[in-house]
Amino acid sequence: MIGVISSIIAGFMLKSYFMLSAPLVYLLSRKERDFGILAYLLYTLYIAKQIVSTSVYSYDGLINSLVFALSSILLLNDVLEREVHLKKLEILTGALMLIGILVPEAFLAGAIFYFFVKFRLDVSILSLLLSIMLLFALLKSQLDFLGGTSNQIIILVSFGLFAIVLTLFKRNLKRVDMFKEI
């Protein structure tokens, strides 16, 4: 449930009021998981197109990108989970994220805290995040130019896909029936 809450808060922070439709995506996933995943894909593509970031090298651009990315990942987690969670961790994280409307760094702190506690990030994921930061620091002169935002997005998506593949190979995931035949 924290993903829906974080998406709504992120919508107010980024002034992208289409993000307020996150509960609809979540409700579709409760009815049928496949519809929820499809709705999430369309939702994320539309929101990503709306949120214009100048560059991750500017402070505002970095904050906006992180708020969008973290809220999207949390919403995906809600779409994929079967149980509804609203425990102390979600309440504390939601309160911290709510402060993010006034202080954007509080939203990021709440999301990162939730990731550390809920997903128990290990050394491989942390090293991947550190390598992303190092790569962006080393390639600043090649990536920080007018129109370079698309290149930055490609690099971030590449690392995201690499992290997904790394996670899938590392963990023993149960097979889930998706797109079952009608």
Image (spheres, rainbow, N blue to C red):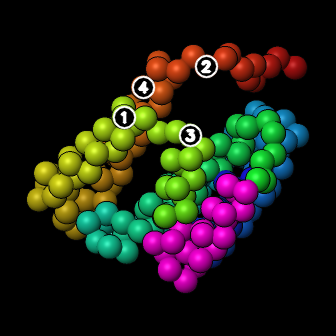
- Label 4 SS: helix
Q: Comparing marks 1 and 2, which lies closer to the viewer?
A: 1
| Residue at the spot 61% in from the left edge and 19% down from the top edge | 173
Residue extent of the magenta highlight: 88-107
* Residue at image point 65% right, 43% down: 77
Question: Mark 3 near mark 2, Cβ–Cβ under 8 Å?
Answer: no
**Dividing the picture into quarters, in which one does residue 140 lie?**
bottom left
Q: Give coordinates of residue 179: x percent, y percent.
A: 75, 23
Callout 4 amino acid: Leu
Quarter residue 4 falls in: bottom right
The answer to whether residue 116 of the structure is visible from this angle is yes
- Give the label, 3 or 4, closer to the camera: 3
Main secondary structure found in the magenta portion? helix
> For the residue carrying disc 4, how many other residues have a C-alpha within 10 Å: few (<14), some (14-19), or many (20+)?
some
Tag shown at residue 33: none
Tell me the mark number nearer the camera, choosing from 4 and 1.
1
* Residue under numbered circle 4: 166
Say which residue label 2 marks: 173
Q: Is residue 36 left or right of residue 57?
A: right
Q: Distance between the residues labelled 1 and 2?
A: 19 Å
Crowding at dot 3, Cα within 10 Å, few <14 / some 14-19 / many 20+, comes out as few
Query: Where residue 5 sits: x, y (%)?
Result: 70, 62
* Residue at mark 3: 119
From the top left corner, tell me how far across and down residue 104 is, in percent. Answer: 49, 75
Q: Position of 38 compared to 74: left or right?
A: right
The one nearer the camera, 39 or 23, is 23
Mark nearer the N terminus (4 vs 2): 4
Residue position marked by numbered label 1 in the rendering: 123
C-alpha distance separating marks 1 and 3: 12 Å
